[in-house]
Amino acid sequence: MVRLSLRPTPVATRVRPAELSERALGLAMLAPMALVLLLVVGYPLVDALWLSLHRVNLTHPEQGQPFIGLSNYLYAFGAHGVLALAVSYPLLYGRLGRAGTGARAAVRRIAQRAIQGNLGRA
């Protein structure tokens, strides 16, 4: 008499030792480079993000670096921010073309005040 079973036949799922050691060797050879890449790329990115959240005055380092949050980003990307001026300044300066030096000097003064942070003041 023949017995029939409804259970599936077990399939070998073990990885052969030669394949496992080759895979482990590949990971072991990639790990140092991945660590170096993480340090070379990751640390400056994290440091730049951290620094962007602080006020830094390179002319007076004794003032420290107080935390200011997203104020630097509001200053850069705001409606009257430095980035808006950086885009509009070349366009305006190019439009002036051969206009008098007084108009160019006025645009240059506005740009200098914006860079110094005195754009809102007269």
Image: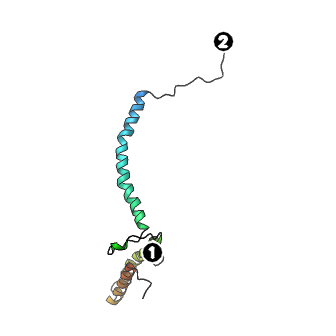
Between disc 1 and disc 2, the foreground one is: 1
Amino acid type shown at disc 1: Tyr
Name the residue: 39% across, 55% down: 42
Q: Residues within 10 Å of mark 2 (few under 14, many from 20)?
A: few
Q: Quadrant of residue 22?
A: top left
Asked whether, in this view, residue 82 is left or right of residue 6, the answer is left
Image quadrant holding the N terminus, namely: top right
Name the residue: 41% across, 71% down: 55
Residue 43 in percent (x, y) is at 38, 56
Which of these two is toward me, 45 or 86? 45
Q: Which residue is mark 2?
A: 2
Question: Does residue 96 sit above or below 59 in this rendering?
Answer: below
Name the residue: 37% across, 74% down: 63
Residue 65 in percent (x, y) is at 39, 70
Q: Residues within 10 Å of mark 1 (few under 14, many from 20)?
A: some
* N-term-proximal mark, 1 vs 2: 2
User: Which residue sits furthest front?
Assistant: 62
Question: Does residue 2 sit above or below 111 in this rendering?
Answer: above
Question: Does residue 60 sit above or below 108 in this rendering?
Answer: above
Amino acid type shown at disc 2: Val
Which of these two is toward me, 12 or 43? 43
- Identify the secondary structure beneath mark 2: loop
Mark carried by residue 75: 1
Name the residue: 48% across, 77% down: 79
Residue 61 in percent (x, y) is at 33, 72
Residue 45 in percent (x, y) is at 40, 59
Q: How many marks?
A: 2
